[in-house]
Amino acid sequence: MNLHATKGTAEYNFMKQHWKLFLCRSSRVPDKFYTHQKTNRRYHFDELLRYSLHLNNDLFTAYNILQDLFRYDLRFTFDEALLFIQRISTNLLDTSAPLLHAIGDSYHKWRFEIASAFSYTQNKIRYTNSIAENINNQIKTITKAAYGYTNFERFRKRVMLIITYKKKP
């Protein structure tokens, strides 16, 4: 992505210092002012964020798609979620940036799985892999604490023991 902010400008310095603002919800942008050190000009964070986004169309598109994902309501049906994912995939594929194009391909390839994660079933149940992710995290923690096991059976037994008798909140 070729941005048109040259080094030393307010936009360039703002993007370097506050890059996390481009990844968060727009409602969480702080109500603060940014002072450019060279010119001592004050900018509001919202104003500078919007101006920085308009320097590059692909960055602007990616930011808007991210905000759409943040605003998505998880109570939709599978068909509505699938249409939402297809719209996002199409928007990503329409960009000229190869990275965003690759992300659009991934969204298109996994659209049914992503739509399943974004929607509820007919019984108002939402499927998630959070239990499996929790167990994987526990296994990684045990592996780090043990500095590696030479006997896999002992490792397996220890994992099963810790997961089975872990304190429940």
Image (spheres, rainbow, N blue to C red):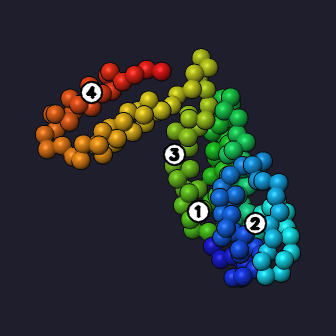
Amino acid type at image mark 2: Leu
Q: Which is more N-terminal, label 2 or label 1?
A: 2
- Gap between marks 3 and 1 measured at Cα: 14 Å
Q: Which is more N-terminal, label 4 or label 2?
A: 2
In the rendering, at what x and y percent does residue 88 appear? 66, 50
| Left or right: 151 as drawn, with respect to 20 | left
In the displayed structure, would residue 66 be above or below residue 118?
below
Tag 1 residue: 101
- Quadrant, the N terminus: bottom right
Amino acid type at image mark 3: Trp
Amino acid type at image mark 1: His
- Gap between marks 3 and 4 measured at Cα: 32 Å
The residue sitting at 51% across, 31% down in the picture is: 128
- Which quadrant of the figure has residue 55? bottom right
- Gap between marks 2 and 4 measured at Cα: 49 Å
In the rendering, at what x and y percent does residue 8 appear? 72, 82
Tag 3 residue: 110
Q: Which is more N-terminal, label 1 or label 3?
A: 1
Badge nearest the viewer, 2 or 3: 2
